[in-house]
Amino acid sequence: MIKPRTIDRYIAAEVVGPFAMGVGLLTFALVTGKLLKLTEMVVNHGVGLGQVMSLIGYIMPAFLELTFPMAVLLGVLLGFGRMSGDRELIAARACGISLYRLAIPVIAVAVVVYAIASWFAFSVRPWANSNLQSELYRLTRTRSTAGLKEKIFDSSFPGLVLYVDHISSDNGSLHGVLISDARNSQQQNTIIARSGIILPDEHRNTITLRLFDGSIFGVEPQSNKSHVTSFLIYDLNVEPETGLADTTREPEEMAYRELERTIAAARTARHPDYLAEAEMAGKYTVPAATLLFAVLGIPLGLKPARGGQSERFGVAIALFFLYYMLMRLGRTLAERGALNAYAAMAIPDVVFLGLAVWMFYRSATDRANQGRGPGDFIWDLIERFGHQEAA
């Protein structure tokens, strides 16, 4: 077994530090986009902070799968940029160490991250997505009483307006219930009940409002006749609020074997499930970006950055945005069946593979212009604009 040399450990440490920082910052930026919805759940629906933290935990694997490749690119750019700025890489190459040799510890780090990203894609993210949907549905049931307020008209249930005079603190039972049911535009009812309870149905993923000792007042629009029906027990079945919990099992929630069976069954029935096929292809292609970004980051890190490390951070964001746009294009083509799922999802990988190999080869053979960085064209525009203003 070949032991890593001092230079290997040194380069790996220079890359791993910014990589870890990138994972934290980028993941936090993505989670921030979900905080508004989570905050609304806490404020308006009585969801506890502990439950919100569990939701964030289930959301994290999907974000980490995307941030790992980007953080690798950021780590290589910042690490090699720092060593290039301090002339350490020039000294290493002057001592006869080729760029191919310097790339070995970077590739080693990328392979480890690729293995982790693949594990997330194949195992962790489907498990987390499935648990996320279960947790969201559980919250739609528990928040139905937690979000209700006494003597306030509540429209949490789609098509219903619910008024409760008193909510028992012991068992959550409702007393003095008034419901306006407008789910059917042809027949709108008003329901009054002395008491009621909320019952979840986990098999059908619905919620039942069981009312006791009340009456139903209805009006028929065609004949303009009204009717009154009294009841001792009346069950009103409602669906959870759309947008909070989706009870259907999507391909991204399926484990690898289940996804395989779904694709095979759809193909046998001659109705291909393009969504499932795109999800399966993405499990292979998206983690591969980790290796491509590692190779691409080396030649980019060698180039000067007039804006310092912040410019390199901007370059990493721009490249990942380009990769993401190509990935969305490929996924759209795959989900519409316009192109084979693996070919469509591999579009960004093929583009970045060609770019990474071309740039790395030119840098390794000293054919690239190392005097200009990727952000110099922006600085040229700024200087040209400044000269025009001065003139």
Image (tube, helix red, strand yellow):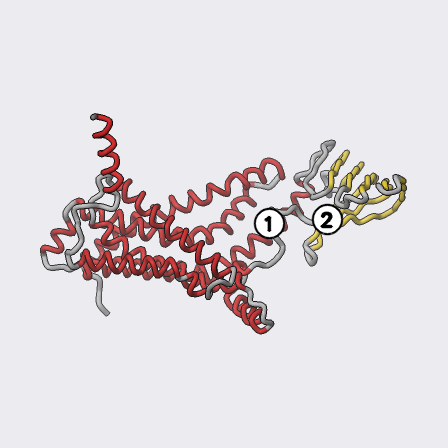
Q: Nearer the viewer, residue 381 or 230?
A: 381
Identity of the amino acid at label 1? Leu
Query: From the viewer's perspective, is 142 left or right of 255?
Result: right
* Residue at the spot of label 2: 238
Q: Identify the mark nearer the N-term, 2 or 1.
A: 1
Q: Position of residue 140 (x, y in %)?
A: 64, 47
Q: CA distance from mark 2 to mark 1?
A: 16 Å
Q: Residue at x 16, y 52 (%)?
A: 89
| Residue at the bottom extreme of this rendering | 268
Q: Nearer the viewer, residue 289 or 120?
A: 289
Residue count near mark 2 (Cα–Cα under 10 Å), binned few <14, some 14–19, many ≥20: some
Q: Nearer the viewer, residue 2 or 67?
A: 67
Task: Identify the secondary structure beneath mark 2.
Answer: strand
Query: From the viewer's perspective, is 28 left or right of 262?
Result: left
Q: Position of residue 388 (x, y in %)?
A: 23, 29
Identity of the amino acid at label 2? Val
Q: Residue at x 70, y 35 (%)?
A: 149
Q: Are marks 2 and 1 in contact (CB under 8 Å)?
A: no
Instruction: Say if 103 sits above or below 382 in the image.
Output: below
Q: Which mark lies nearer to you, 2 or 1? A: 2
Query: From the viewer's perspective, is 380 left or right of 31?
Result: left
Q: Which mark is residue 136?
A: 1
Res 148 seen here: yes
Q: How many marks?
A: 2
Q: Residue at x 66, y 39 (%)?
A: 147
Identify the image quadrant of the C terminus: top left
Res 218 seen here: no
Q: Position of residue 373 (x, y in %)?
A: 22, 45
Q: Position of residue 213 (x, y in %)?
A: 86, 43
The quarter of the picture where residue 29 lies is: top left
The quarter of the picture where residue 161 lies is: top right
Q: Nearer the viewer, residue 239 or 232?
A: 239
